[in-house]
Image (tube, rainbow, N blue to C red):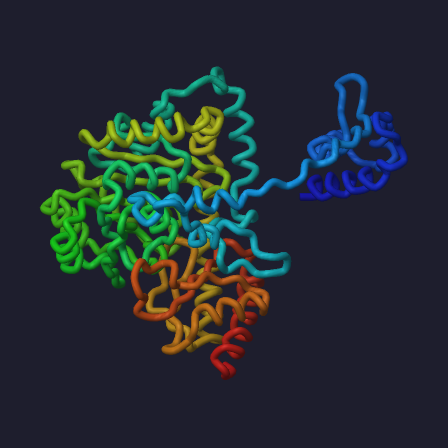
Amino acid sequence: MHERSSVGELAERLRKELDRYSPGGKLPSSRALVERFRVSPVTVSRALAQLAAEGLVVTRPGAGAFRARPRATAAPAGDTSWQEVALSADGAADLVPRSVDASGVLVSLAAPPPGVIEFNGGYLHPSLQPERAMAAALSRGGRRTGAWGRPPVEGLPELREWFARGIGGPVTAAGVLVTSGGQSALTTALRALAPPGAPVLVESPTYPGMLAIARAAGLRPVPVPVDADGVRPALLADAFRATGARVLVCQPLFQNPTGAVLAPGRRGEVLRIAREAGAFVVEDDFVRRLVHEDAGPLPRPLAADDPDGVVVHVCSLTKATSPSFRVGALAAHGPVLERLRAIQIVDTFFVPRPLQEATLELVGSPAWPRHLRAISTALRTRRDAMTAALRLHLPELVLPHVPSGGYHLWPRLPAGAAESALTAAALRAGVAVTPGRPYFSAEPPAGHLRLSFAAVAGAGEIAEGVRRLRAACDEVLGHGG
């Protein structure tokens, strides 16, 4: 962090001094800048690279850095209003919509303004990410023989084998495709399994990013309610009969947003109901590695108990590492695998080989199990801190379920409380929260918030965030706690 800030500071100081030099004029040497500003040679080269990227400086190897010549006057802006017609013509008849609503996804991707506590984050706080282990793995992976060559389109055999072992049961390396994270894998799965215009059964509530994928592919999400034990089998069977759907998307482990785990007695039922409907189950096993310290043994993935190829399994390393460590897997068996493979190849060719090599280095290192143990402890501590603070200071927010995995809580708002007003008031008070509405594909039964405890610095920030949320509730609900 210190290196990054000093690069920005040096670039700013050099930017202010550029007027001293005529266009094409030579700047002081890197050595002179190192001595004058008392920074490292690396800081100097990065600051100059930043100015070069901005078009203010030109660097010539062996000759030095020079002030760039002014650019030609910008061309006058054209008239792009014709695009409104081109982009919307006959849009109502499109099976696959050409405009995509990304708002549900951006909630967890957009950085909040400075000073705002991030209860809406979808990833680990930098202090919880294995930054040193990832950097070392990337360095080692990049030096492996052939690391910058073209990988097999399905992924490196050793990485496919590692994912298959983690899933278990009948899943083999031959049935695994390496993907660029879970979102990409879900996109491939839904495009492979349902034609535009078809219904797809989804849990209610569920992950907004998956609803966005479905709608962008022209599919109709049909909600199947979940309770504390996961998706409800009787309602699932009714939904398959009523819609003729051939796909169910579910998260059997620490469901997003409810945190529910599919009960042992329901696992076989869900597979049997899907099999009788001639349907696939897309299992999004997104946070298996974010289990809390007190969880006890985890149930196996549904794919591990599925000899008939009903389950298309999706998992990813992103949630347990960093938003930019986009490596995941799609696993299936039977004829569907060839269709999944073809769609992925057409869309993305393959996951960059250096990232796959780095993944093998990371998961094969002693740092990996250490990291998983550390986040298991940290997430339990943070979950307990947020749960205690909410119960003490915001008792009107009902917490029906406290999960033993994942990274967030799902409190229900009091009857009549306006989600949108509370979300806006919270942001004014300095805490970003996620409203519940985007998690429902139809009308929600009640107002909710999703509160993440993984994207903040620690227990102190959780306490302060709850204090700010209390102030927002006082403003919107009109009473103190």
126 versus 335 height, above or below: below
Q: Residue furthest right?
A: 20
Q: Residue furthest bottom?
A: 479
**Left or right of 340 on screen, residue 466:** right
**Left or right of 337 on screen, residue 316:** right
Residue depicted at x 26% and y 25%: 174
Residue nearest the viewer, comparing 412 with 189: 189
Residue nearest the viewer, comparing 226 with 240: 240
* Residue 221 image point, x, y percent: 27, 52
> Splitting the image into 4 quarters, where does residue 168 fall?
top left
Determine if residue 378 is in view.
Answer: no
Residue nearest the viewer, comparing 164 with 314: 314
Residue depicted at x 38% and y 42%: 183
381 versus 297 height, above or below: below
Residue depicted at x 50% and y 19%: 148
**Left or right of 217 on screen, residue 476:** right
* Residue 103 image point, x, y percent: 45, 53
343 versus 315 height, above or below: above
* Residue 222 image point, x, y percent: 24, 55
Determine if residue 481 is in view.
Answer: yes
Count of numbered labels shown in the rendering: 0
Name the quadrant of the N terminus: top right
* Residue 412 image point, x, y percent: 37, 70
Residue depicted at x 76% and y 20%: 60
